[in-house]
Structure formats: C-alpha cells, structure tokens
Amino acid sequence: MKMASVIMATLIILLSGTHASTSEPAQIMLIGTFHFSNPGNDVVKVEDVNVLDEESQLYLQAFSQRLAAFKPTRVLLEYDPENEELVNQRYRDYLEGKYEPGVNEIYQLGFRIARDAGLKGVQSFDHRDLNWEAEPMFEYAKQHNSPEMVIFNENIEYLTNEEDKARASMGLRELLIRSNDPEQDRLNMDLYLATNSIGAGDGYAGADATASWWQRNFRMYANIQQAAKPGERIIAIGGSGHMAILKQLLEIDSRLVKVDVDAYF
C-alpha cells in the first residue's frame, strides 16, 4: 500500500513537471508599420516611402537580423489568407534565390526575419471578410448634417499633414519607431471614435461603423491567439492602424506574454 502511494506521488510530480515545461505561455511581439507599398486603402492618404534605397535596405537587413535573434517560431503577416500558398511559394523561391522580394513590408521585413530565423514558411493573420463599414454612417451624417464629420475631416487633414512631414524628414528607422509610438496608436484609434456618436439613439450608424472596424481586428487577434500555442515565440507585422488595437488586446490577455519591439529598433 505504501509502495503504491509512493509510485502515485512520483507520477504526480513527474506529470506536474512535464505540464509546467509544456505550458509556458506564448510570447508575442507586435510590430506596426506604415505600408511600404501603399495600396491606397487607408483613410489617411500619403505618398510612398522609398524603402529600396541603399540606406533603407541596410537598415532593414540589420533590423531583421536583430528581430531574428528573438528566435521566433512563427512570423505572422498581414496578407489575404486566400493567398497563403502563393505567398509561401514566393517565400520558398526567395530562400532559393529565385524570387526578388517586392516593396511590400511582407517581403522586405517578413521574409527577411523568417529567413534569418530559419523558418520554413510564413503565415497570414489577416481577416478580409470584414472591413470598416462606414457608408451607412457617411450617408446618415450627410442627411443630418452631423457636426462630428467636421471633427473627423479635421483629424484626417491633421494626420495626413503630420504623416507627410514625417516621411519628408525621417529615415526608415525613425518612421518605424513612430509607427509603434503609443501616442500615434491613440490617435489612430481616436480617429474612429470621432464619428462614434453619429446617429446615437437613432440607429447608431457611427457606433456600428466603429464596431465593424474593431470586429475585424478582434478576428485578426483571434488568428494570433490560435497560432499562439504554449512555447511559441511569435512576431506579427501589420499596419499600425490594426496594431494599435491588437496591442491593447494583448495588454489585457492574461494567456499571452507581450514582448516590446522597442529594444530592437
């Protein structure tokens, strides 16, 4: 009887130790970027930055190597999930020197980090079935001469001017730091809140539009959560508008460990 108890106790200790070693929470590093090759889908419209010049390329090479030292087990990127096989075929060709990476941050940053980390592929965390459903809000605001649109348009003008100034005066490193600045994240989110009260009490067109943007980002965060198995070390790269929200979700997610990118710039 005593021997059986000893054996049982030993098994419990061994199993407890095994559970502890395999249940280490995933570590997540979220990196916001401006779009290197701007598709023109963002609310704030600005000119592209030339990331193919020599100075930018040298920085991207060094930055990617520093991020690879984090030893990511996955690199998650913002591209249409329907293109998963296409993007990964390009990545395999890139590893073999058969593909010249395009201007997009998917290639210039994501492919480099994955290669330097020795990964066999990359993965999308994007979600394209939902977007910012703002047309009903704009229509309501036009019909009711909503004063919130004045603030919204002023914010758009301000953010556009500030972004133009930054791109004209800063190098790539400074622009990436700016894309991950908490104050820029706040301004990014506040842009949507400026119109949130449109139609309050009368259909809530503004709140529904804001909710649609947050819903897309909740789904993107769900994709990150799904990839974040115990022990994973994940780098996720996406537009700063998305990352502003995803960083907040990561902050309050008790199941995952946030890793700041600041030290890697």
Image (cartoon, rainbow, N blue to C red):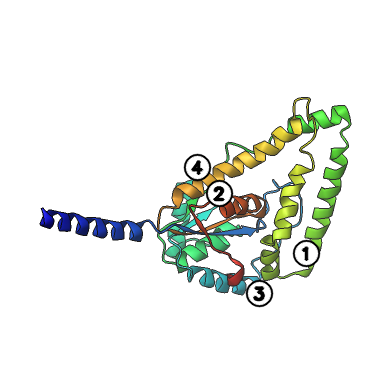
Question: Badge 2: few (under 14), some or many (20 or more) residues near its Cα, within 10 Å?
Answer: some
Q: Nearer the viewer, residue 25 or 180?
A: 25
Question: Circle 2 sits in a helix, a strand or a loop, which is it?
Answer: loop
Looking at the rendered structure, which numbered label has been put on residue 55?
3
Question: Badge 4: few (under 14), some or many (20 or more) residues near its Cα, within 10 Å?
Answer: few
Pointers 3 and 1 in contact (CB under 8 A)? no
At 58% from the left and 55% from the top, the residue drawn is 251
At 51% from the left and 61% from the top, the residue drawn is 111
Pointers 2 and 3 in contact (CB under 8 A)? no
Question: Circle 4 sits in a helix, a strand or a loop, which is it?
Answer: helix
- Three-letter amino acid code of the residue under disc 3: Glu
Is tag 4's residue or tag 3's residue first in the polypeptide sequence?
3
Q: CA distance from mark 3 to mark 1?
A: 17 Å
Is tag 3's residue or tag 1's residue first in the polypeptide sequence?
3
Residue where numbered disc 4 is placed: 82
Q: CA distance from mark 1 to mark 2?
A: 26 Å
- Three-letter amino acid code of the residue under disc 4: Glu
Residue where numbered disc 2 is placed: 79
The furthest residue to the top: 202
Residue where numbered disc 1 is placed: 166
Q: CA distance from mark 4 to mark 3?
A: 34 Å
Question: Circle 1 sits in a helix, a strand or a loop, which is it?
Answer: helix
Is tag 4's residue or tag 1's residue first in the polypeptide sequence?
4
Judged left or right of residue 162, residue 263 is left
The C terminus - image quarter: bottom right
Is tag 2's residue or tag 3's residue first in the polypeptide sequence?
3
At 81% from the left and 28% from the top, the residue drawn is 140
